[in-house]
Image (cartoon, rainbow, N blue to C red):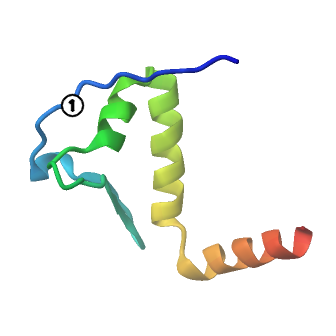
Amino acid sequence: MLTLVLLLRCVKRTSDDLDIYVGTTRSFEWYWNAGDEMLGRDAFDELDEDDQDAILATVKYWGDLERRQAHRQVSGQRRAR
């Protein structure tokens, strides 16, 4: 069995690091834990540029998607199952 251990550098973050994307219909933020760490942001920073771009494109898509369209997409996925 292969076990992957991910070692992250925990960086002291500020509120300036909080926003991922502020879209036209939704906003996304990094989660802060009780120790004032943003482990998701730390993991994101360790990704290569292509993977970061893919994540940001997905967040931007959902942030700008109108609520009515999002509801239709989710409803359509449920019917397709």
Choose top left, top right, bottom left or bottom right for residue 40: top left
Choose top left, top right, bottom left or bottom right for residue 25: bottom left
The residue depicted at 47 percent of the width and 21 percent of the height is 5
Q: Which residue, given by chain and number where applicable, does mark 1 sit on?
A: 10
Quadrant location of the N terminus? top right
Query: Is residue 25 placed above or below 16 in the rendered structure?
Result: below
Q: Nearer the viewer, residue 74 or 9?
A: 9
Quadrant location of the C terminus? bottom right
Q: Mark 1: which secondary structure?
A: loop
The residue depicted at 81 percent of the width and 74 percent of the height is 78
- Seen in the image, is 9 located left or right of residue 62? left
Query: Is residue 44 placed above or below 49 in the rendered structure?
Result: below
Residue 48 image offset from top left, x and y in percent: 45, 20
The residue depicted at 54 percent of the width and 68 percent of the height is 65
Query: Is residue 43 placed above or below 15 in the rendered structure?
Result: above
Q: Amino acid at mark 1?
A: Cys
Q: How many marks?
A: 1
Query: Is residue 28 placed above or below 40 in the rendered structure?
Result: below
- Seen in the image, is 11 located left or right of residue 19? left
* Local crowd size for mark 1, using a 10 Å CA cut-off: few (<14), some (14–19), many (≥20): few
- Seen in the image, is 52 located left or right of residue 17? right
Q: Nearer the viewer, residue 52 or 7?
A: 7
The residue depicted at 76 percent of the width and 78 percent of the height is 75
- Seen in the image, is 36 located left or right of residue 69? left
